[in-house]
Amino acid sequence: MHLGKLCKYAGKCSVYQNENNEVKKPIFLVRNVFCNRGAKGWTNCKRFQLYETGQPVPDDLTPNG
């Protein structure tokens, strides 16, 4: 469940899919801060920034970089 707007890359994002072992915080917190918050969260996400510019996004990259 998300209260804001879901990131358009959530379906292929290793963080959102909970497949990124580098994320140390509870996944529901990370999703609420970055993935489900709309533009405010997305613009702070390093993964989103790379997706938007067409650059490769490493599977182990966290939203904080």
Image (spheres, rainbow, N blue to C red):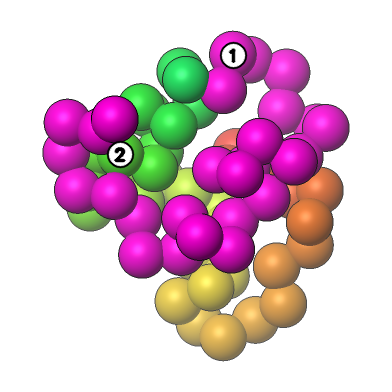
| Residue at the image position 76 percent from the left and 40 percent from the top | 20
Amino acid beneath label 1: Pro
Q: Residue at x 48, y 48 (%)?
A: 45
Query: Magenta segment, principal secondary structure?
Result: loop
Residue 48 located left or right of residue 56: left
Q: Which residue is mark 1?
A: 26
In the displayed structure, 6 sits above or below 31; it is below
Q: Nearer the viewer, residue 64 or 38?
A: 38
- Residue at x 56% of width, y 23% of height: 27
**If you read the primary sequence from the N terminus, does the residue marked by circle 2 or circle 1 appear first?**
1
Whether residue 43 is visible here, answered yes or no, is: no
Q: Are the two marked residues, 2 and 1, in contact with CB atoms closer than 8 angstroms?
A: no
Residue at coordinates 81% horizontally, 48% vertically from top-left? 60
Q: Which residue is mark 2?
A: 36
What amino acid is labelled 2 in the image? Asn
Residue 53, image x, y percentages: 50, 82
Residue 22 magenta-highlighted: yes
Determine whether, in the image, residue 22 is placed left or right of residue 47: right
